[in-house]
Structure formats: C-alpha cells, structure tokens
Amino acid sequence: MNEQTYNKSEAAIFRSTKEVFGRLSNMASGYTIFVNGVMILSSEALYQALKFTAHSDIQHKIISEKSPMTAKMISRKYNDLVRPDWNDIRIDVMRWCLLVKLTQNWTLFSEVLISTGDAPIVEYSTKDKVWAAIDTGNGTLEGANVLGRLLMELRHTVKTKDRFECVEPLNVPDFLLYENEIEWVCDETNDIFDLGEDVPEEHRHLAFA
C-alpha cells in the first residue's frame, strides 16, 4: 500500500490501548479469539503465531503469553524461522485476523469501529511507516497506515453488511495452527462449527472468495 498523509485534527488516531480509540489496537485486551478450539487472547498473538505455521512449539510460546506485547517480543526472537512467503501474505493474514476478531467479538469491536464515524483511522507510531503513520511535525501523519486502512475496510463492512457469523480459512499453503489446518472460524460461542450443507447461506461469509 502506498503512503498517505492524514490531518491529525480530522483522524481517529490510536497508539496506546488506554486512549479514546485504543480498543482498535491489536494490543487491546478483552477480545478473546478461538481458532480450531484454541483460545487466543488477542489478535496480535494470533497474527504473530501465524508467522510460524511450520513451528507449533513457537506458536505455543506466543499464544501462551497473556500480554500481547510479550507475544510480539517472543516472535521477534525467531525471525529466522518466519515462513518464507510472509511478506507476500502478511497483509491478508492481518485482514483475516481482524475479521476473526470482529466475528467473535461483534458487539464490542463494531462499537469502537462505528465510534470513529467517517474519520480516517490511523495508527500513530514514532517509526513505523508501514503498519502505521509517523508525525511529520506540521499537524499531519504520514505513512502507509496499513492497519488503519484495514480497520477502515472493516468499518465499512460493519456499516454496509449484515452481521456475519463465520470466516473461512485464508487460502494460502500450510495455513496451520498446532500442525492442523485452520478451519472455518465462527461465532457465537467462540468455537468452530461444522459448515455443512445445512448451514444457512446468511451464516456464511466468504472473506477470501
């Protein structure tokens, strides 16, 4: 994604989870996720774990951490073992993680997304111009702001589509958690459901058709 410039006075900006829009952060607590029946405490931990689909032991170390920041720091220790196609798929993986977060925490997450109105959503950083944007010193933020733009996509989905209950697995090779292929992820009990022919069409959501 190309870099963009955002007017700070017009944007919904988040950095710390304690700020007004802090619940948009992948570091925010209170958004438990279940994938293949495995409880994951944050979208950050899920995202980091998916870097290591060939290494279930590293996934377990990441997912076992209560702190999203600690989970991220553990991930950095194993940069040499990140799946080789990561740079090609990481944005799609993040989009998938956010969809799963929304599906299983619809009320809480959609509430904060809608609270941003139509303002640009921007993650503020002091150095990351890829996932976030940095302060230029003249009242603007500049960067690709990939996370913010994915959140704006999600906000549009919340505003324009009916609530969906399921997210299909990402269509990439070896999309694994603990050596098992990741299945459809569904609400409402934070569990995985068998999507057979009897599941109503409105309960399906082909995120990556």
Image (cartoon, grey):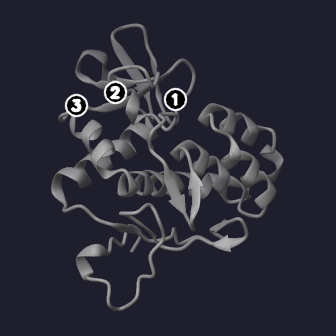
Residue type indicated by callout 1: Lys
Which of the two discs, 3 and 2, sits closer to the camera? 2
Quadrant for the N terminus in the image: top left
Image quadrant in which you'd find residue 24: top left
SS type, badge 1: loop
Q: Position of residue 136 (x, y in %)?
A: 43, 13
Which one is in front, 129 or 187?
Answer: 187
Question: Relative to 79, does residue 5 appear above or below in the rendering?
Answer: above
Residue count near mark 3 (Cα–Cα under 10 Å), binned few <14, some 14–19, many ≥20:
some
SS type, badge 2: loop
Residue type indicated by callout 3: Ala
Residue 82 visible somewhere in the drawing: no
Residue type indicated by callout 2: Phe
Q: In the drawing, what numbered circle is on residue 151?
A: none
Q: Position of residue 163 (x, y in %)?
A: 24, 61
Name the residue located 26 percent from the left edge and 46 percent from the top edge: 155
Name the residue located 19 percent from the left edge and 60 percent from the top edge: 161
Residue count near mark 1 (Cα–Cα under 10 Å), binned few <14, some 14–19, many ≥20:
many
Which of the two discs, 2 and 1, sits closer to the camera? 2
Q: In the drawing, what numbered circle is on residue 21?
A: 2
Question: Relative to 156, does residue 116 appear above or below in the rendering?
Answer: above
User: Which residue was labeled with disc 3?
Assistant: 119
Is the C-beta separation of discs 2 and 1 under 8 Å?
A: no
